[in-house]
Amino acid sequence: MSPPPQRKWSRYAVETKALKLLRPLGIAFFVLISLFPFYYMVLLSMREISEVIESPGSILIGIGDISFDAYDRVLRSVSDGGEGFVRFLINSALLASATVVLTLFVSILGAYAVARLQFFGRRQIHFLFLSVYLFPPILLAIPLFVAFSKLGLRGQLPVLVIVYVAQTLPICVYMLRNYFETVPKSLEEAAEMDGASRLGIIRRVTLPLALPAIAATSLFVFMIAWNEFLFALLFLVEERDNWTVSLGVSQLKNIETPATTLMAGSVILTVPIIVIFLFAERLMTEGLTRGAEKG
Amino acid sequence: MAASTEPASKAAPGRRARKGNTRARRDSRFGVTLVSPTFIVVMAMVILPVLWALVLSFQRIRLSGIRRLDVFGGEYTLRNYDLLLGSSDFLAAARTTLLYSVLGTAGAIGLGLIAALLVRSSFRGRGIVRGIMLLPYVAPVVAVTFIWQILLSPQLGFVNAIGTSFLGWDSPVPFLSQEKGDLGLLGVSVGVPTALLMVILFEAWKSFPFAFLFILARLQAAPPELEEAARVDGATPTQVFRHITLPQIAGVIALIAALRFIFTFNAFDDIYLLTGGGAGTEVLATQVYSFLNARNDVGASSAVAMFMAAVLAVFLFVYIRFFAGREEQT
């Protein structure tokens, strides 16, 4: 043991050295746990199921052993003995796009009002948004399920669009409001001097300036709608023609499907999301955390 | 929420005041118009359903009777709540939910905090590393739960393959279907709820990017001078973290903890897809679903869901009471 005066110095040295060593290891650990499952998914989707059963521990694949049979099976239509995922891809794309358009339209108006206008109930509106996150989706699912069953509309995609709009509205209003608040008021006032109407100001001044935020918000909504599972399961499960990709993959498991097919379905489900994310990661994360930086 | 006219409209003597006044009123009316679509959608798809679920939870309704259902008619009864409080399944699910939410939240924040500290100062490839670390959170839940299922599978799972051939496991561990397992540690065998532990680990893995992102944003907005000054004064890295860094990010961590707790408490997808609620992982959300789907009992499932909402309401009240005020000061 070293004497007390040196100990303080040595603690400093030990900690600094240890951190220098541990930091790259830590980063490597996090990259590994974040990336490996996805690598394994892609790998498995391209292997033969017999090989996987034989050597489940191998994580490399020869170029010659790559097989796209699982993808073929997943994408082929049901009448050709496949799983009909092309149909599900179209459904998911339509559903997510419609959700984006409708949510944006509603939330742009709402966010502008909350950011700029003094109106009755402006402060209370946040409690309304809070309620969307406070109440478990499964709680909302029961009465919505009962109501739409009663109306005979349950299996329809447009019904799901409305549900998704309600689920994504608060986060959109929040993200857009943060951005609208950064648009200088003087610009809008100048436009008003020139005789533009309020709606004209929103359309010609505020919206063009907020375009990055609107793009980020759209992609965010698209991802949420694309990934959603609970409502799709409850509402659509009996209407195979209306299944989304998420639901389609989850139902692959019910029938005895080889793991490779399951993984091929998962890849098809994941790829669009990863592409969007790679394309716009900065844009999206900045919009989301803008409020958090203040504390 | 009846819109009473602004009190300011009474007093409007000067021309200027009147002008400002009509302007304010026009703004107010316009604001209400703009926000009304949002209001209507949330009202119709969230608030009214919640109120209706409350009504349903006091009725005896089965799914088969839906078409004949008279919305507010029918008898009201406490049967559903009575049934729940006497049911050991319900109490077990409530306990599991609490354990799952608390430990899942703690795990996600712990991992997220470490990750944020690691990636905080710049290095080559930092942007890519940051992007990769967000993948578990953005990827579709259906896909990632299946990847985990296959990784952990006893027959063709990677984890068991490594465990049996390199780590000396006697036999493959059915991670997601084993309710109680023995963990041998330093010669001592400890009983562990294997499947529950796995879904908690999954939750920590899937959600750590959320904590990571917000903590990192807060860290990067913090002024570097404070930490530099402490370092100059001879504080060690752990001391700097404990006394300088941590107090600065405590607010955002409290906020993330509250959000993650609510999300995890409400989560249905993860456990439903990983274990189907079996092997001791039944939480309240999956119980609501099984009441609705397997037992066709709308009344009982509404009662469980209302119980969840009540717990969260209490939680939120406590949080706002004790934490929100403090945050504003810092």
Image (cartoon, helix red, strand yellow):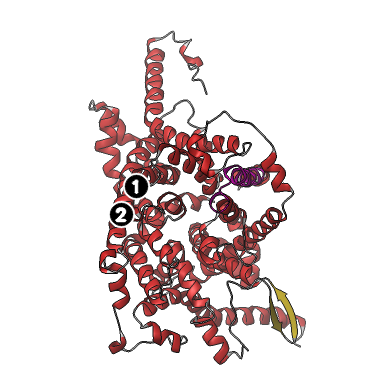
Q: Amino acid at mark 1?
A: Leu
Taking depth in this image into account, of A264 and B144 the one nearest to the observer is A264
Q: Which residue is mark 2?
A: A91
In magenta segment, residue B205: no
Q: CA distance from mark 2 to mark 1?
A: 8 Å
Lateral position of residue A7 relative to residue B44, left or right: right
User: Which SS does the magenta portion mostly show?
Assistant: helix
Q: Which residue is mark 1?
A: A157
Which of the 4 image quarters holds residue A172? top left
Confirm whether residue A212 shows in the render. no
Instruction: Residue A53 in the image: state x and y as whole percent.
Output: 45, 85
Taking depth in this image into account, of B208 and B80 the one nearest to the observer is B80
Q: Residue at x 56, y 69 (%)?
A: B114
Taking depth in this image into account, of A188 and A27 the one nearest to the observer is A27
Magenta stretch bounds: B292-315
Image height of A166 relative to B126, above or below? above
Q: Residue at x 65, y 45 (%)?
A: B307
Q: Residue at x 55, y 80 (%)?
A: A22
The quarter of the rendered structure image containing the N terminus of chain A is bottom right
Lateral position of residue B309 relative to residue B28, left or right: right
Instruction: Residue B322 in the image: state x and y as whole percent.
Output: 68, 45
Callouts 2 and 1 on one subunit: yes
Question: Which comes before the other along the chain, label 2 or label 1?
Answer: 2
In what element is the residue under mark 2? Answer: helix
